[in-house]
Image (tube, helix red, strand yellow):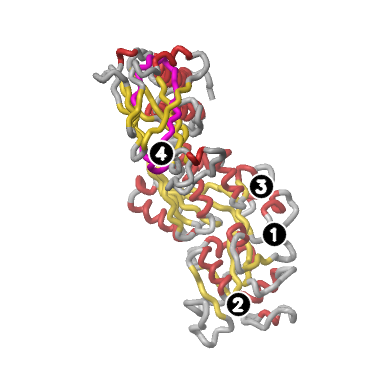
Amino acid sequence: MEWLSAENVVAVGTALLGIVASGVMVWYERRVPRRKRIGYRVQMDNPIGDDVRSGRANRRLGLFDEAPGMTDATLVLLRIENDGSQSIADNDYTGRELHGLTAVFTDRTIRGVSVTQPDGTDHLMDHFTRAAGLGYDGNTLRIPRVPLNRGDHFKLLVLLSGGDVGCPIRLIGGIRDGEVHPNRSATPDETLPLFSRASRLITIMLTVCVVTLATIVVARDDTPPPLGCEKGVLKITGSTAFAPVTQELAKQYEKDCEGSRITVDARGSAAGAAELAALGAQSAKSARSVIAFSDGAATDVGGELFGTRVALSVFTLVVNDDIRLPHGLSLAQVRRVYRGQVTRWKQLDATLPDLPIVLVSRNADSGTRQIFQQRVLGSWERVPSTSLDCVRKDDASAPVTRCELDSTDKVLDKVAELPGALGYSEVTLAKGHKGLRPVPLDGAPASVSDIEYGKSEYPYRGVEYAYTYGRPSAGSLAESFLAYVSQGTGENVIRAHGHLPCSATQSTGLCEDD
């Protein structure tokens, strides 16, 4: 990826500009002269009398109890501050009275007031005189027109009686070109935020959005798509055993090559090849957008289909979990079973349960079945189908119960369901299925790696073919997809599903051993 591309420079520049703009907004909010504000906040509202109705009364010491009317006394600390962007002069207060602000203590009576101010603001005390308007009457405290520089504040400690702690306290008054408003603070001397809550929210959202945009652009994968990507529509049919591989390959190709749409409709190897041949007889153009995958070479489909070796697939016999065959079966034993000469497991080994053998097979369209017949049995499955549901024998004279199903998943489910059942499947699908066990043949387990490195002559294996109607034309989606299958991503997907890519077996010739 080119980090210093013009696009990335613009994106990062935009992010920096957004952050700077957010900072300018903060500065403008607080520094540009545009309004005046006086804020106030109650920093303490505590009971000091024994009869305060809030229920939080404090026991007093000394002779304070003797003061008349103090049994329900409270102390309030009121902070008044210039939290705007301009200084406030005495003539900025807009009231007609001598004083500038009025504090109202609801339901309470003022008994006394003390004024405090921070260090360095002694000059403020000169304004707290009766002549300047300081005074109180009932629940109302009159506050003089105190000039406040930006950031200045003073505090009023007010002794009250009557009423409850927490009764509303309001500051009334007006400021020219400004406002008087309440503030909130968690601690008595906490510094207020530099700008308003709305401004903070807008600033945070703007910053997050701009930084996210820059991150997406910079971190985006600009790796060019694989060479030979093509657009269009492609249908994949055929093998159900290889369907998990074709489904993932289709998704990966669509992800890497925009504008392509690939559907997978697995119906069985023979059925897929026959469908492609029939479609080609009707419309060669339509047939060129279909690929049929077959477990083993397709037969009886005419000479118009062109096969490409894609992968070496390994298959295995599977048995219900109740049947434990630590050493598996020999080829001779398997052939006896599928000829109907052995009908119960105990006939193979006295240690096995005395259960009838139920043969769960694929239908005639299955490439998995064809490879099983060619590589393991050396002939057709001689016991005909005797059951539709794999449970009841429709032909009572048949030596063994045998049924045929139209997909690998159905075979695995049925073998896992029926005690004594025996079937066959692509090895990776079988290993991930509960309720059944893979069966070694002649002592050799179904292992792709052992076959790849010449450690095993395991027989139940075959080449996966991809059939097209004629050789795929240059620049077609079918040609591009098949090339993708034999390259890096395609090879990784094939291996991840337990198959061996034919593109990796050229030196060993494993895919030539049909």
Q: Which mark is residue 458?
A: 1
Q: Which residue is mark 3?
A: 509
The segment highlighted magenta reads 142-168
Of residues 39 and 470, the one drawn nearer to the viewer in this rendering: 39
**Nearer-N-terminus badge (2/1):** 2
Could you give the CA–CA distance between mark 2 and mark 3, rounded to whole angstroms?
40 Å
Q: Residue at x 52, y 40 (%)?
A: 484
Q: Are marks 2 and 3 in contact (CB under 8 Å)?
A: no
Query: Upstream in the sequence, badge 4 or badge 2?
Result: 4
User: Helix, strand, or loop for circle 2?
Assistant: loop
- Whole-percent x, y for residue 41 in the image: 42, 30
Residue 144 magenta-highlighted: yes
Label 2 is placed on what type of residue? Pro
The answer to whether 90 appears left or right of 505 in the picture is left
Q: Which residue is mark 2?
A: 419
Q: Which percent across, then down, holds residue 104?
A: 33, 32
- Is residue 432 shown above or below 470? below
Number of the label disc, if any, that sits on residue 161: 4
Residue 506 point in image, percent of width and height: 65, 43
Mark closer to the observer (3, 1)? 1
User: Residue placed at 48% from the left, 83% from the top?
Assistant: 394
Q: Amino acid at mark 4?
A: Ser
- Sequence order check, earlier mark of 4 and 3: 4
Cβ atoms under marks 3 and 1 closer than 8 Å? no
CA separation in Å, label 4 and label 3: 103 Å
Within 10 Å of disc 3 (Cα), the crowding (few <14, some 14-19, many 20+) is few
Q: Would you identify the image quadrant in which residue 196 lies?
A: top left
Instruction: First in sequence, mark 2 or 3: give its number.
Output: 2
